[in-house]
Image (spheres, grey):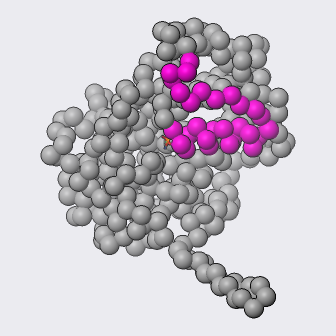
Amino acid sequence: MGSYKVKTLYKDKSFSFSRIGPDIYGSTHPQNLLSEIKERAEFLYSHNSPLKGKILINAFYEPSTRTRLSFDSAWHRLGGDSINITDKSSTGIAKGETHLDIAHMFNNYGDCVVLRESDNEAIFEMTKSLRIPIINAGNGIDEHPTQAMSDLYTIFKWRPHLVNKSIDDSEKITIGIIGVPSRMRTVRSLLKLFCKFPYFIKKIIVIYDDKSIDQNDLFDEGQLEQLIESDLKIELETDMQKVLPSLDVTYINAIAWVGENYEVHGSSFKLHSELPFKKDSIILHPLARGSELSTSLDQTSKNWYFAQSRGAVFVRMALLTCLMDRTTRVMDVV
Ligand code: CP
């Protein structure tokens, strides 16, 4: 952890500043990760404003802090403009307009849609009439793919050598997921993404509260089978304290947005700085924070959840750049 002390003089007053916690943004700079990556990425920095003149329709029919603002920030950083929906009741949905018709309108107003909708099926309905690309920013309890991309990016920033497929067994990591795969879109998408990267994972331990959910309801049909078929070793556990000392990454989420409200899961699990975490391990949380994640962790080296939300901007910038470049090459309507 870096630390510094600065003294300034203002007339006869002396101020001193010192870092009170880890450099949660600086130490998570992707410099080490970039040196591990072999792919050529010239395209990503070949021009500064690839989205100049393009308009993003940022359609959030459900509350959001991070996803909407980071997509907006990413699009603006790439030189584009955006129009935002932040309240379902102010749109045609309040008059009974269908997603199919809304998508027809979106074609006229923008070049790309980012959609968050509580209705799992809305995104699929929209694709029937859309002629511009759409990105899923959370569809009900189903999926949140760009959150999972940001989670994985954070893990790779923390341990850059995990990008190498030939890593030794001794370097593989154990990941604890405190959450409900069948009910949480963040967990569901992250597990799906892990299926593509089983080579760096020793095992995944799903930690659940058996007083609030039956073990048989933890996974949706086919979900566990997909993980096992992808060569991931899955264990189930109800005693968080017992497994914490073995976890390299502790991922926690406690809420699932369902319809117009949210469900709280696993409220018996609360992470705080006095728990027996493994040395050099990290905590991830998609946020928003609830009582499951104590602020006592914010100034510790376990806190990679702020880096996780910061990195999401750059992941989304990369995604948008690649997506829009491809779109202009393969579609004749935009
Ligand atoms: N992680 C996440 O989806 O946060 P928001 O709900 O604030 O977008």
Instruction: Give the image quarter of residue 271.
Output: bottom left
Q: Is residue 176 visible?
A: no
Q: Residue 47's spot in the image, x, y percent?
A: 84, 42
Q: Residue at x 25, y 59 (%)?
A: 240
Which contiguous range is marked in magenta? 64-91
Relative placement, left or right, of 234 versus 169 is left
Above or below, 10 against 49 in this view is: below
- The part of the image, by quadrant, that contains residue 243 is bottom left
Kindly identify the residue that appears in the image at 60 percent across and 13 percent down: 103
Q: Is residue 150 above or below residue 133?
A: below
Reply yes or no: does residue 75 show up in magenta: yes
Which quarter of the image is occupied by the C terminus? top right
Q: In percent of the image, x 32 and y 72: which residue is there?
A: 274
Residue 256 % position (x, y): 36, 37
The residue depicted at 45 percent of the width and 49 percent of the height is 287
Check the picture and name the quadrant holding the N terminus: bottom right
| Outermost residue to the bottom | 12
Work out whether residue 221 can be spotted.
yes
Q: Please indicate whether residue 314 sits to the left or right of residue 55 in the image.
A: left
Q: As displayed, is residue 284 above or below residue 260?
A: below
Q: Count all numbered tags in the image, as a single digit.
A: 0
| Quarter of the image where one finds residue 325 | top right
Queried whether the magenta region covers residue 220, the answer comes back as no
Q: Is residue 135 left or right of residue 31?
A: left
